[in-house]
Structures are given as structure tokens and as C-alpha cells.
Image: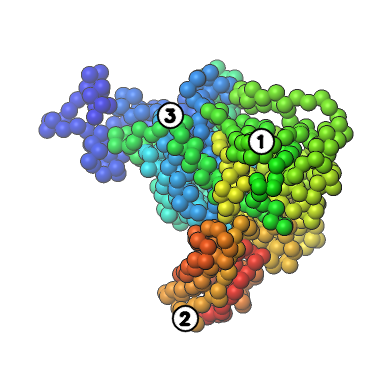
Amino acid sequence: MKAVFMLLIAGSLTLNAQNKIPVYLDENKPIDERVEDALSRMTVEEKVAILHAQSKFSSPGVPRLGIPENWMTDGPHGIRPEVLWDEWEQAGWTNDSCIAFPALTCLSATWNKDMSLLYGRSIGEEARYRNKNVLLGPGVNIYRTPLNGRNFEYMGEDPYLAGKMVVPYIKGVQENGVAACVKHYALNNQETNRHTVNVVVDDRTLYEIYLPAFKAAVQEGDAWAIMGAYNLYKGQQACHNQYLLNDILRGEWGFKGVVVSDWGGVNDTREAIFNGLDMEFGSWTNGLTEGASNAYDNYYLAQPYLKLIKSGEVGTKELDEKVRRILRLSFLTTMNTKRPFGSFATEEHALAGRKIAQEGIVLLQNKNNILPIDLNTTKKILVVGENAVKMMTVGGGSSSLKVTYEVSPLDGLKKRIGSQAEVLYARGYVGDASGNYNGVVTGQNLEDNRSEAELIAEAVSMAKDADMVIFFGGLNKSNYQDSEGRDRKELELPYNQDKVITELVNANQNLVYVNISGNAVAMPWVNQVPGIVQGWFLGTEAGNALASVLVGDVNPSGKLTFSFPVKLTDNSAHTPDGNLGAATYRFPGTKDEVKYNEGLLVGYRWHDTKKIKPLFGFGHGLSYTTFEYGKVAADKKEMTTDDKITFTVNVKNTGSREGAEVVQLYISDLKSSLPRPLKELKGFDKIKLNPGEEKTVTFTVDKEALSFFDPDKHDWVAEPGDFEALIGASSTDIKSKVKFKLK
């Protein structure tokens, strides 16, 4: 009503004869009616104007009608600091320091949909408070290779898990009147040549591996926006792609929302008009090249589109469809007077981030029960590694953040342990001493001019005198590591960390390695190091979360969402198998083309089917307690395609402390007319159990869980025959199985 009042004062709006407000401003009317009413009042120029950006992160509304601008913000891990109107440089605000939430790899590793909802609600509140109505996230591109620099922003290698975890996130964000913009649709699985590479993938692999999470986001999550990808598919840019956007997204899935381009992802006006794009944003001020004086008027969906309309070369049917979708977005967000006000940089959000981080941390190896740290006997702890002190919220690309604070692993340990034990620090290695990204400056001085030999010698000398050594290593968010724009060059740890770890464990066998990364790394010393923890990028509360798990205040319950290969060639995108073509051709391919010749066999599907033992398998994660699985049972031996079948299994906590276990259901098709992976995840449940407590876990599946995509029929097929349900603690730790038949 405030918008109506202001428009009446300005004289640009008059009430109708019945003294009623216009339909488009009446929130009691259905959105479709409001959209049509607003559309009927707009000029062609106003319609074209709302299709494209007016600044780095905003697009125009319709001031004459009181329809506000749209303001985007980068997620998916926190609300990006304000930049200048036309540039990436910082705007210099003093009140835009946010809470950084854990990276999405950590969120998915919780295997807990409640944590996903909490995440979405919290970050949605932060976006709403900052008056952003579109959050550019979450990301659900599939983890195809451990070298993808952007994997840390995604949800792992399994399409079923990613689909189940993305839906609550979307719902949580959109409860705040903020649109989730799910990205990057589709097949954006590498940063190398991302603007030019055409992905060659068969239909079956596309539908079974790379599309299900996006489909879930649309049909189950009701996402209000989708972001296109940079790469090409079938020779067309993904941001204006007939097959992906018109045929599948809108045609097959019924998507009603807005398709937003990735920044600078538009390359052709006519394709953008006809192939499903709604809103164009760009990396430079004109979306094409740097520094044009008439800026946003030069966008593909700006003056070039308007000229085609006015010359009669194209009609306005597609224009009206785009505007309808953008107006709908406005009525759901900026024009919704009932949406909450949000909150920003609060303690509540910081604690939510810590809770998610604690649930996502994965205990990979725990020989001799080296963890949790026994503070009764451990009185001197040596912390080694640059990642123990380096801020990880700055850098990495568009998810780089300016935060209110960030607790380092070293500070988190010192705070938690206090006077119970002495905590010392040695650098061990120098990685990237810089702390400046896009004008956000950490203020850390990590310069160290000592030689590699001197740094190692210091750490080894101190290790000999310590009760325990904790090495915080892994990757960082610098170029060619976990960072947008460039892929990793190798699976091995950077900065010669392997040498440091080897020398440390030779000096002190009580060594725990904490891997800070969003990707798998090689661990040639795995048999010598008793304790290994996957520590992710955990955001604002990183150090506190890690300390709580290391000392045992929190029992770890995270599980891996991607496989750790022993060596790079054990990953299907890098295997030298002659039948699949040269490894360099499959990843990263040439400048113009990459072939997904491994097909369906991504991640654990490859390891299982080819009998290649991973370093740590998909779904793996240990606990400080132990769990005993009973035998899985089915409620029937046969089911029909319009029926369901239910599996039950008892799980008991046989240890001495409370813990949570992720019970996983895999389905195996024992005989199929088309090749299928050995097994596929089709259900999971995270349960908490007190010592001695036992619970029954139930999974119910229908024909969808048994189906594969038949490219000849272009449809999902549940083929009659014999199947097997497998219950496991991970893909490599199957506890029991039961056969059943589909009639």
C-alpha cells in the first residue's frame, strides 16, 4: 500500500471508477491476474528495459507503475559485499560485513535436510535484510572431477543426494521473499574454457546424472529462478539454449520462473529472444566489452532487441512471456508487503553456521582412537600449517565474502582448550600469503621469508616434543585451487605439503591431518597418519566448529558426498582407458569441446562398476561411537509398477556415547536391457541414537527408484525383473541386502 500511496501523490496513478486500487497492486488478487494487468499497462520500452541489467547487480523495475528494481546478490555461502555501480571494486560500505556459512560441500555432507532448511532460512534472512530479492545460489552441478575449481560450491557427485539436499535450501530462502536462483544450468562441470567449451554428452547421462538435482529444484523446491551456465550444449550457449531451456526446463518440467544469465553468458540477441532467456546480466558495463559509454543499452536484450521489434523483424510474443515471468518474480519478492524484514550478521546466524559445520565435518580415519583429543593425557599440542591461520572466507571467485569475523582453526583450538593444554604453532609451509580479493582485504600478514627447509626443520623439532601434532593443510581459494575461473592442475596437495606431513609423522606418530578443501586430494601418506578429518571451508565459525569435533564436544556425523580416488587416473574423467578416449580429451577437453565418454559412471558408480578401490568412498564417515546394523527386510517379494515396496533395518548404537548415523539405501538392477551402474543411491536417513538405543529405519520406494532413462523412448522406464536393495554405512560398506522383483 505504501507504493500505491506514493504513486497517488506523484500523480502517476489514479483509482478506477469503483475507487479500487489497480489489479496489479492488489495482493488479494491471484498473481496471474496481477501480472496480466501490469503487463497491459507497460510500454514496449519499459518491457525491454526490465530484461537487462542497469548495474553490476541490479535491473530496472517500472518506476511509473511503482514496480521496484530487482537486486541480485552472490551466494551461496553468504551475502556478497556491495560493489560500485558499474565495477567490481568495493563500494566502501561499513555495514555490509556478513556471516559466512559453510561451503555447500559441507552442507551436503551433513546428509541432513533439516540442516539444509536451516541454512536456507538463515542466508535468506541475511539477503532480505540487505534488500536483495534474488540470491544467486545454490549450486548443484555434479562433481565429475576432483580438479574442478568450483566443486566447493556444489553438493557432490550423486544426483539423488544433491536433489534431496537442494530442495529445503530453496524453500528456506524463499520463505523470506527472496528468490533462490539455482545454478549453473547445466553441464558446468569445469572452469577451464568454460565460456567456449561444448559439452558432448548422451541423453541418458544428461537425464540420469546432470539434470535430476535441477529437476528437483524446480518441481519439488519451486525455485523462482534458474541461472544459465557459460558452456555450450549441442552447439548452443546454455544461457540461451533451445534444448535445455525451452524443451526441458519449461516444456518437460513446467518451470514458471525466471531464467537469469550468468554474468556475461549471453552471446546472441536472436538466440536470447527465442531460446528461453529472461534476464541478462554482464561482467563488464555493457555486457560485451569493457568501457562502452552507453553501457547497459548495448546488452543483447537491450537496444538490439528493441530495434528488431521496431523494425518488425521480430514480434512481441516472446517479449511478453519474458516480462510475465519477471513480473511474477517481483510480485513474489519486492511487491510482497507481507514478506519478513530479515536480519543480518546476527549471533543466531553464526551459531546456525557452526551447527551446520559441526554436522558436515567428516572423520575419515581414526586409528587407535587418536580422536577425540584426550585432554587428560595430552598436555602439549603442536598445530602446523598455513591453513590453521589463513582466512578462507576471502577469495575463490564470486562466493568471496567480507565477514564480520572468522575464527581460525588455531584460535578455535586455543579458545576451547584454554589452560587444559599448551597449544603451540609452527608454519610448516608457505602457500599464499596474500589476503586481498576484489578489494576485500583480510588484514592478515602471512609473509614468511624462511626457506622450506627452515620451516620444516622448525615444525619437526617442535613435533618431537609434543604429545600430539595437528596439521591443518589442504587447499585454499587461490587460483588453480578451490576457486572460480580456473581448475586445479593436479590431485596432489600444493606447496609440497606431502613432504611436511611425512617428516612430521616420522617425528611424532600421534598426527592428525585436517584437510581444508572442497575437493578430494591425494594422500600418499594415508597409512602412516592415524587421524584424518575432512574439514571443508566452514565460514565464520570454522575454528570453533573444528575444535568442538577434535576434542569430542561434538561427535562427528558427516559423510562424504564425493569419492576420494587414490590417484587421479582412478577418476572416470581422467582414466587412460583406451575405450574412453584420451584423458586430456575428456577433461578438460579442447578449447571447443569436451566429451563425457564415461557416461553414467561418475564417482562411486565408476569405482563400483570397474572394481577400483577408492581412498575413501562416497558416503564414508566415521563416528566416536559404533553402530550395529541388523538385516534389511522387505515387506514383499514382488511389486508392480503402480505399487511401492518398503524396506526396514534396525540400527543400534553399540558404543558409549550418543551419535548420529546416516543409513543409506542403494538399489541394484540385477539384469537390464541397458548397461547400468552396479548400484545407485535411492534413499538415506540420518538418525540419532543414545548408547544402547536401537531404531528401525524405513525406506519406501516406487518405480521411480528402479527406473532408467531410455533415450530411444525419451522416457523413464522401470523394466520388470530382479532387483536388490542394499543397506550400507557408505557405498563401500554395505551391511546387508535383499532381493525383490518388479512385475
State the residue in front, 288 or 328: 328
Q: CA distance from mark 3 to mark 1?
A: 32 Å
- Disc 3, SS: loop
Q: Is the residue 9 above or below the residue 646 in the image?
A: above
Residue drawn at x 86%, y 31% as measured from the top left? 454
N-term mark: 3 or 1: 3
Tag 3: amino acid: Arg
* Residue that mark 2 sits on: 636
Amino acid found under the numbered disc labelled 1: Leu
- Give the label on residue 410, or none: 1
Q: CA distance from mark 1 to mark 2?
A: 54 Å
Please identify the quarter of the rendering in which residue 477 is found: top right
| Image location of residue 689, percent across then percent down | 50, 61
Residue depicted at x 47% and y 22%: 95
Q: Residue at 56% across / 76% down in the picture?
A: 631
Q: Secondary structure at mark 2?
A: loop
The residue positioned farthest toward the right in the image shown: 453
Indicate which disc residue 217 carries. Answer: none
